[in-house]
């Protein structure tokens, strides 16, 4: 999911000490994320915005350059062009940015595209083959295929938690035998049946990987590669208790979705099952914010939710 941020942030009020401290914490966290995922343009957008909010204009501009390169490298040429234009407003003669703009125009013309004024907000994304841009198969064209997280979908029942798609992924990646995954699926289905109130949901990934950190790391790595979601180490994040409560309990506790930070009109949410398309749709319908999704360890999400809602560990 591509983020749309306001260019050239103008602060409407002076940041309080608490607000400044929270943004500094956000900066530190996303600097760590970008050390291992340097081309994650969602994190670069957030970091650029955060730098601007605390008055670090030079760092914001430097991040804008990285963002333009990340868009360019991913084939999002219109977004790269827009970012280059923002940079040129501040540095009109930046040679590498002017060169990138020329390269973008050449590539678009070679591909038979015309650059239209006020183009698509999502950019011209280079096709990566028959699959979706995030590596998932469009629709349900083949038996055992995975659902594309980015394509348009019909409204789905919230009874579909995406566990079957996650189970297929674990089997297809040869992380676990099919019988073991099926057994864990049945257990999780029973635990999650008719959840009400502040009942905490069970995670298939947590249930099957709990005793094997190597397998959990392998599963998380595979999910990151497949979905292009960035990983966030939630266990080290100091979460404002009010942010998770911006979502109803049935989406936080009931789906293990953890809103963990808020910058301007963008809310960052960690999940442990990116195939829960129905739940993610419900989140977007519940919030008047741009939502950015991240992957986190299920155990870390569960522990954070228990802390926020002051819950006991579920047996």
Image: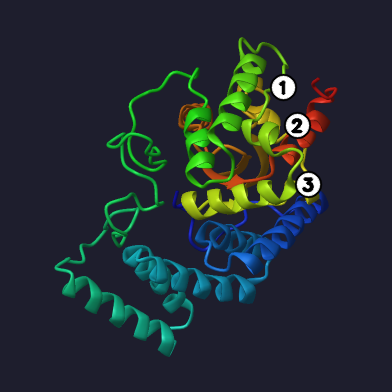
Q: Is residue 239 visible?
A: yes
Does 250 appear above or below 219? above
Q: How many marks?
A: 3
User: CA gap, disc 1 to disc 2?
Assistant: 8 Å
The numbered mark, 3 or 2, whose residue comes first in the sequence reads 3
Name the residue located 48 percent from the left edge and 22 percent from the top edge: 160
Does 293 appear above or below 288? below
The numbered mark, 1 or 2, whose residue comes first in the sequence reads 1
Image disc number at residue 235? 3
The numbered mark, 1 or 3, whose residue comes first in the sequence reads 1
- Label 1's element? loop
Image disc number at residue 200? 1
Q: Nearer the viewer, residue 121 or 36?
A: 36
Residue 208 in the image: x percent, y percent?
67, 34
Residue 295 in the image: x percent, y percent?
61, 46
Q: Nearer the viewer, mark 1 or mark 2?
A: 1
- Label 3's element? helix
Q: Quadrant of the C terminus?
A: top right
Position of residue 106 in the picture relative to residue 237 (left or right) = left
- Label 2's element? helix
Q: Nearer the viewer, residue 261 or 34?
A: 34
Residue 88 in the image: x percent, y percent?
42, 78
User: CA gap, disc 3 to disc 2?
Assistant: 11 Å
Name the residue located 67 percent from the left edge and 17 percent from the top edge: 191
Name the residue located 48 percent from the left edge and 49 percent from the top edge: 227
Give the residue pinned by disc 2.
305
């Amino acid at each position: 999911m591509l983020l749309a941020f306001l260019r050239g942030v103008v602060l409407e009020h002076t940041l309080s000490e608490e607000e400044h401290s929270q943004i500094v914490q956000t900066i530190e966290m996303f600097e760590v994320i970008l050390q291992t995922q340097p081309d994650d343009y969602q994190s670069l957008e957030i970091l650029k915005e955060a730098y601007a909010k605390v008055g670090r204009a030079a760092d914001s501009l430097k991040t804008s350059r990285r963002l333009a390169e990340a868009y360019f490298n991913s084939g999002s040429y219109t977004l790269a062009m827009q970012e280059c234009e923002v940079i040129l407003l501040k540095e009109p003669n930046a040679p590498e940015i002017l060169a990138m703009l020329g390269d973008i125009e050449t590539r678009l013309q070679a591909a038979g595209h015309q650059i239209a004024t006020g183009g698509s907000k999502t950019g011209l994304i280079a096709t990566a083959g028959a699959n979706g841009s995030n590596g998932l198969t469009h629709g349900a064209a083949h038996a055992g295929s995975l659902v594309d997280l980015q394509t348009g979908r019909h409204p789905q029942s919230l009874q579909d938690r995406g566990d079957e798609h996650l189970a297929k992924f674990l089997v297809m990646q040869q992380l676990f035998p099919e019988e073991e995954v099926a057994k864990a699926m049945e257990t999780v289905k029973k635990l999650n049946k008719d959840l009400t109130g502040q009942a905490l949901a069970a995670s298939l990934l947590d249930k099957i990987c709990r005793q094997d950190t190597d397998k959990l790391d392998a599963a998380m790595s595979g999910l990151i590669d497949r979905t292009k979601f960035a990983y966030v180490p939630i266990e080290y994040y100091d979460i404002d208790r009010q942010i998770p409560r911006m979502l109803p309990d049935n989406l936080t506790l009931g789906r293990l979705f953890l809103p963990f930070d808020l910058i301007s009109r963008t809310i960052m949410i960690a999940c442990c099952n990116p195939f829960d398309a129905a739940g993610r749709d419900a989140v977007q319908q519940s919030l008047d914010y741009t939502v950015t999704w991240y992957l986190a360890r299920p155990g870390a999400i569960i522990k954070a939710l228990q802390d926020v809602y002051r819950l006991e560990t579920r047996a």
